[in-house]
Amino acid sequence: MDCKETQHCIHLFLKDELDRDTEQKFVEHVHSCSECMEELTIEYLLLEGISRLENADDIDVQSELEDKLNRTMNRKKVCGQLKAGLFLVAALIFCIFLLGGA
Ligand SMILES: [Zn+2]
């Protein structure tokens, strides 16, 4: 998959509309191409950031994107423990954010 193809797939990936095969190639490219990773990050922040601002329930959008990418790469390895760990990390970051912003 080249850059043009990858960037075309970004919004499909974010909406979970890519098939498994394409999704895999997409994530592989994004991990090896900083340009496409940047593009993906921007699109994700725009998409998720806006809805999060409305809900104000979670601010750690960047690491959620990383989580989404990692989930695609290691789909079979994901377990409840990992999710619980990520939740704790996110909660911790949120607390730091609250303290820092006070
Ligand atoms: Zn690229």
Image (cartoon, rainbow, N blue to C red):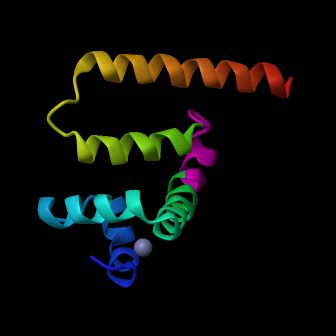
Is residue 54 shown in magenta?
yes
On the image, the x and y values in percent for residue 55 come to 57, 40
In front here: 7 or 32? Answer: 32
Position above or below: 44 against 35: above
In the image, is 63 to the left or to the right of 25?
Answer: right
Classify residue 37 as left or right of residue 84.
right
Q: Residue at x 86, y 23 (%)?
A: 102
Q: Nearer the viewer, residue 25 or 98?
A: 25
Locate residue 1 relative to residue 96 in the image: left or right: left
Number of numbered labels in the structure image: 0
Residue extending farthest to the right is 102
| Residue 90, percent from left and from top | 53, 25
Where does residue 92 sit, x and y in percent of width and height? 60, 17
User: Where on the image, by quarter, is ligand 1?
Assistant: bottom left
- Most extreme residue toward the bottom is 4
Q: Is residue 86 visible?
A: yes
Residues drawn in magenta: 49-59
Q: What main secondary structure does the magenta stretch of the protein show?
A: helix
Residue depicted at 43% across the width and 24% down the height:
86
Q: Is residue 96 magenta?
A: no
Q: Nearer the viewer, residue 65 or 95?
A: 65
Any part of residue 15 in sight:
no
Residue 62 vs residue 56, the one in the foreground: 62
Residue lying at 18% horizontally and 67% vertically, measured from the top left: 22
- Image position of 79 with respect to 44: above or below: above
Toward the front, the furthest residue is 32
Q: Quadrant of residue 83?
A: top left
* Quarter of the image where the N terminus is located: bottom left
**Residue at 25% across / 46% down in the picture?**
73
Relative to 4, say whether 51 is above or below: above
